[in-house]
Amino acid sequence: MVTKYVATLRAGTAVLEPTQPIPSPRRITTWIMRRPESLSDSQRDQLDRILDACPDLASARDLAHEFSRIARERRGQDLIHWMTRALDEGPQPVQGFAAFLQNDWDAVVNGLTLPWSSGAVEGQVTRIKLIKRRSYGRASFGLLRTLVLAQPP
């Protein structure tokens, strides 16, 4: 078989497959994090080849999709099943993420379950920090207090 292939190369009749450039890690990550139905056929084919070549990446993709579904659908009660699967089957970076989530378990489950958000409070804190930064070194505490209270949120 090798002899026949070498003969076609010497004769100049061998058909070489065009090589596709290897996608960047950022592009692969984008493909993994997008919903599969939103990918084009060529992107899906490339991603399938990449995932076949790297089983750890395929496992990380499955775990990322499952975590995304839990967060999107606010199913914090299902996080324990995801956590055990991630710690048992996931690649090292996913295991590290899962172990980090265990540090403040109650807050993570509540954040993925309850409808409330601290976004309004965080927005006010950012606004106050901006006022403080803008007048750094030029305003006393009294003036800063007036600026914070005078500007509507």
Image (spheres, rainbow, N blue to C red):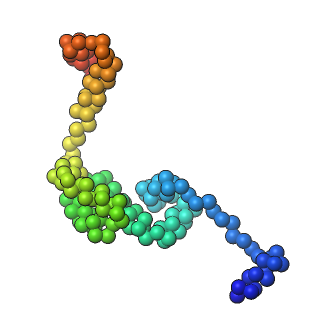
Q: Residue furthest right?
A: 11
Residue at image location 23% in from the left, 41% down from the top? 117
Residue at image location 29% in from the left, 53% down from the top? 71
The correct choice, above or below, for 25 with respect to 123 in the image is: below
Q: Can residue 38 be seen in the rendering of this structure?
A: no
Whether residue 55 sits left or right of residue 119 in the image: it is: right
User: Who is closer to the viewer here, 66 or 96?
Assistant: 96
Q: Residue 78 placed where, x, y %? A: 23, 61
User: Who is closer to the viewer here, 1 or 83?
Assistant: 1
Whether residue 8 sits left or right of residue 1 in the image: it is: right
Which quadrant would residue 144 be assigned to in this image?
top left
Whether residue 148 sits left or right of residue 69 in the image: it is: left
Whether residue 77 sits left or right of residue 53 in the image: it is: left
Identify the image quadrant of the N terminus.
bottom right
Q: Residue 96 placed where, x, y %? A: 30, 59
User: Who is closer to the viewer here, 88 or 116?
Assistant: 88
Q: Residue 143 placed where, x, y %? A: 23, 12
The correct choice, above or below, for 51 with respect to 99 in the image is: below
Q: Can residue 14 be seen in the rendering of this structure?
A: yes
Q: Residue furthest left?
A: 106
Residue at image location 43% in from the left, 70% down from the top? 55
Identify the image quadrant of the C terminus.
top left
Which quadrant would residue 94 be assigned to in this image?
bottom left
